[in-house]
Each structure stands twice: as structure tokens, then as C-alpha cells.
């Protein structure tokens, strides 16, 4: 039974007199946050924020991820997991045999019939090494029902590559740019289009890149006005930001 179906059942029982208001209030509170000891699962996040609870697997034990996942599935919610390695995925697969895995993105999902629509989201990488972060963004969009377009390996080391795609850039409604090294691609794209640009610094680069800090600071100091920056390697956050922008603009 979904959370919405449970809520309707509670309200109908109150209406019929089969359930007292105080007990109904407690049951409704449980619908919101389900406390399983080591985690409080936010089942109503989608109704508040427009996207459901997502499991961040890094730092969790496989048993904890399985327990959270089973509670989400019990409510018939879409299951999406980020930062999951192959070892944990194999452990989860034994319990959830229909779980699928994207190795590059390090995401896993069990989505059922999630309606997907063309989104106008364009995801770009400066280099091939940035694709893992871009795929985290892409699979997040897909899990939340938005089909992104991908444009990979068009960094400033061969700037003609991105300039040759100017038509595709101008057609996009929101652009996510994943770039490491000096992170210059976000500024280039920001200077070419009128769409919102979300920059994702990646931890790709040699020693002085400081694990993505150089790209982060360069993107924050971009001279292309209005470029928005998320945290290092945060493809998930960039995707959710892009979807929020689309919804705010009425492109649902």
C-alpha cells in the first residue's frame, strides 16, 4: 500500500467513526517519518519537495541500506541509491533481485513504471574522466522521471568541440556541466547560452587540482554571470537542482 493509500484509509476510518482523531494523528505522523532505529525514512518527501527519499549508500552497512530499501519498497515508492559500490550492490542484489546497477554512476535503482518525459536537460562533460559524475546526474534525472541529453568530452583543451554543438546548447532548458582540472568549461558554456547553467566541479586532475577544489573555486569565480555551482562530484545535487528549475518554470 502506498503512503497516499494509507492516508486515505486513515481519513476514511476517521470519517466512519472507526478511528479516533488522536490515534489517527499518531498514524499520520508515522506516515511522515518511519523510525527504524538507525534511520528515519521520509516517506512524504515527494509530496513536499517533488522528489522521493533517496538512499546515500556511502558510509552505510549493506544491512542498513537493505533495511531502508525494503521500507521504501513496502510503501511502493521508487528506490534509488547513490554512491553504491559493486560489493554493496552484490549484497543488495541477493535480497532485491530486480535491482539494477550503473557502475559508472555508482547508482542502483528499482523504479517500476516511472513515467519519463523529455526534459530539456543537457548534461555535458569536459572530459571522459568526468563521465562518472555526469552519469550520476543523468541516472538521477531518469529515476525522477526526466530524460536528459548527454554531450561528453567537449572540454576547453579542444574548444572547437563544444562550439560545434552550439545549436544543441541553445536548445537546452537547463545545462549541467561536469568539469575537473581548472573547471573552465562551465564559464565557456555560461557565456554562450541563456539557459540556467549548473556547474559540477569534479575531483579529476593533477596534484594542484586539490581533489576538485581548484575547479570549485574557478567555477565560483566564473565571469559568466549566473552560473550556479554545486559541491565537488555532486552529480545528484546538480540533477535535483535542474529539475527544481524546470518545475519552477512550469516545465513539468
Image: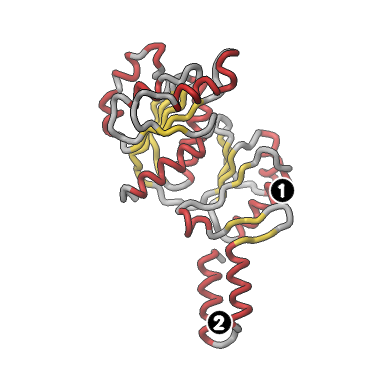
Tell me which residue sits at (61%, 42%) in the image.
56
Q: Which mark is residue 13?
A: 2
Instruction: Residue 70: name its quadrant.
Output: bottom right
Tag 1 or tag 2, which sits nearer the N-term? 2
Secondary structure beneath label 2:
helix
Residue 83 or residue 218, whichever sits in front? 218
| Colouring of the image | secondary structure
Q: Quadrant of residue 147?
A: top left
Could you say which disc has been placed on residue 210 in the image? none
Q: Residue furthest bottom?
A: 17
The reply, left or right, for residue 46 in relation to residue 39 is left
Q: Is residue 78 above or below residue 231?
A: below
The quarter in which the N terminus is drawn is: bottom right
Q: Nearer the viewer, residue 5 or 47?
A: 47
Between 125 and 112, the one nearer to me in the picture: 125
Residue 10: x and y in percent read 56, 76
| Cα separation between marks 2 and 1 | 34 Å
**188 is higher (above) or lower (below) than 234:** above
Q: Residue at x 49, y 56 (%)?
A: 46
Relative placement, left or right, of 34 versus 218 is: right
Name the foreground residue: 151 vs 155. Answer: 155
Q: Position of residue 175 (x, y in %)?
A: 37, 33
Q: Residue at x 48, y 36 (%)?
A: 137
The secondary structure type at the circle numbered 1 is: helix
- Give percent across and percent down for residue 169: 30, 28
Q: Residues within 10 Å of mark 1 (few under 14, many from 20)?
A: some
Residue 165 % position (x, y): 30, 23
Name above or below for residue 189 compared with residue 234: above
Q: Which residue is mark 1?
A: 64
Amino acid at each position: 500500500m502506498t503512503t497516499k493509500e494509507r492516508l486515505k484509509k486513515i481519513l476514511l476510518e476517521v470519517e466512519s467513526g472507526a478511528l479516533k482523531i488522536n490515534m489517527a494523528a499518531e498514524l499520520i505522523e508515522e506516515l511522515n517519518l518511519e523510525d527504524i532505529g538507525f534511520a528515519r525514512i521520509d516517506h512524504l518527501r515527494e509530496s513536499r519537495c517533488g522528489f522521493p527519499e533517496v538512499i546515500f549508500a556511502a558510509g552505510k552497512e549493506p544491512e542498513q541500506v537493505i533495511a531502508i530499501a525494503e521500507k521504501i519498497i513496502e510503501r511502493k515508492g521508487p528506490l534509488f541509491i547513490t554512491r553504491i559500490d559493486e560489493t554493496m550492490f552484490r549484497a543488495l542484489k541477493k535480497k532485491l533481485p530486480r535491482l539494477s546497477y550503473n557502475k559508472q554512476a555508482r547508482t542502483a535503482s528499482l523504479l517500476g513504471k516511472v513515467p519519463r518525459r523529455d526534459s530539456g536537460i543537457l548534461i555535458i562533460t569536459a572530459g571522459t574522466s568526468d563521465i562518472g559524475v555526469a552519469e550520476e546526474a543523468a541516472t538521477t534525472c531518469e529515476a525522477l522521471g526526466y530524460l536528459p541529453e548527454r554531450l561528453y568530452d567537449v572540454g576547453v583543451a579542444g574548444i572547437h568541440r563544444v562550439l560545434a554543438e552550439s545549436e544543441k546548447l541553445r536548445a537546452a532548458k537547463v545545462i549541467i556541466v561536469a568539469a575537473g582540472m581548472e573547471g573552465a568549461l562551465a564559464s565557456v558554456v555560461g557565456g554562450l547560452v541563456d539557459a540556467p547553467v549548473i556547474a559540477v566541479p569534479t575531483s579529476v586532475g593533477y596534484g594542484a587540482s586539490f581533489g576538485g577544489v581548484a575547479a570549485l573555486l574557478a567555477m565560483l569565480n566564473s565571469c559568466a554571470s549566473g552560473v550556479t555551482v554545486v559541491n565537488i562530484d555532486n552529480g545528484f545535487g546538480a540533477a535535483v537542482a535542474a529539475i527544481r528549475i524546470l518545475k519552477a518554470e512550469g516545465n513539468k
